[in-house]
Amino acid sequence: MTVPFSEFRRARAVIFDFDGVIADTEWLHSDTFRKVLEEEGIRITPEDHDRRFLGINDRAGFALAFEDAGRALESGEVVRLVERKSVYYGARIEEIRPFPGAAELVRALAARGPLAIASGGRRHEIEAILIANGLRRDFRAILSADDVARSKPDPEGMLLAFEALRAEESGRWSDLEPAECLVIEDSLPGIDAAHAAGMRCVAVAHTYPRERLGGADRVVERIADLRAEEVIERKR
């Protein structure tokens, strides 16, 4: 059951998902993922993508799509498919924009405590969008699909982001605990990953309708509905 922010214990650090939370990218991930599959003779609809593949990284997604189609896929072939999708995605990356209010929230939160990203996206894609929108300096760590062996809902990425914040050079956050981290997510696997890591989770209904996000500790319609003072407890 979600709770109102008046009763929601604030965090010391925030871990963001990226696609579908900060940047409006899920449509482009769907387009390019489905394009690669179609070239391989596997056709899925946008609805199939959102139902079956949203929230998991490309390696896991392609493996699942081939499994659903009853076809074997070697690890080297997965790499080839992921790289092809990345080329298609990169060719259209200038079409990507942050969600309204996302940049303002990131900057306000960064003034109050440490931020990280734990995403199923590729690092160079995330970095390019953050740099283009003047947000890269606000994140102390970025953990991407390139850094993990297991996709969400496994908590590996969340825990690596947490460890990166704890290891921050100043040592200020060396006593940080998972329960003091708040995750901001848009997907069901992401919510499960946050909870598996021992962290609380706010879900934004950018991608799923809010009634499907009841597993989160709090649900908001848009990232613009979040306020920094409601999320992080104290200034640096």
Image: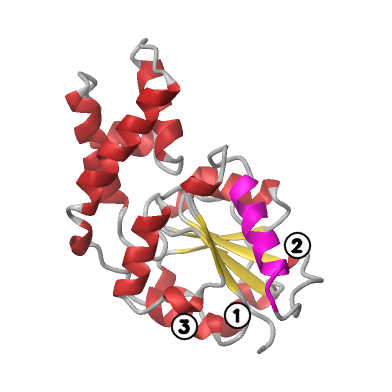
Near mark 3 (Cα within 10 A), the count class, few <14, some 14-19 or many ≥20, is some
**Vertical relation: 161 (above or below) 73:** below
Observer-side mark, 3 or 2, equals 3
**Which residue has dot 1 on it?**
230
**Which residue has dot 2 on it?**
179
SS type, badge 2: helix
Viewer-proximal residue among 142 and 191: 142
Report the quarter where the N terminus lies.
Answer: bottom right
Q: Which of the 4 image quadrants contains residue 37?
A: top left
Q: Amino acid at mark 1?
A: Glu
**213 sits left or right of 53 in the view:** right
> Which comes sooner in the sequence, label 3 or label 1?
3
Visible in this render: residue 1?
no
Q: Which residues are magenta?
A: 156-169
Residue at point 39%, 12% (across, down): 72
Q: CA distance from mark 3 to mark 2?
A: 23 Å
**Which residue has dot 3 on it?**
107
> Which comes sooner in the sequence, label 2 or label 1?
2
> Which comes sooner in the sequence, label 3 or label 2?
3
**Vertical relation: 45 (above or below) 86:** above
**Vertical relation: 177 (above or below) 209:** below
Principal secondary structure, stretch drawn in magenta: helix
Percent x, y for residue 126?
38, 60
Q: CA distance from mark 3 to mark 1?
A: 14 Å
Percent x, y for residue 163?
70, 60
Dots 2, 1 in contact, CB < 8 A: no
Q: CA distance from mark 2 to mark 1?
A: 16 Å
Q: In the drawing, what numbered circle is on residue 10? A: none
Dots 3, 2 in contact, CB < 8 A: no
Q: Amino acid at mark 3?
A: Arg
Observer-side mark, 3 or 1, equals 3
Observer-side mark, 2 or 1, equals 2
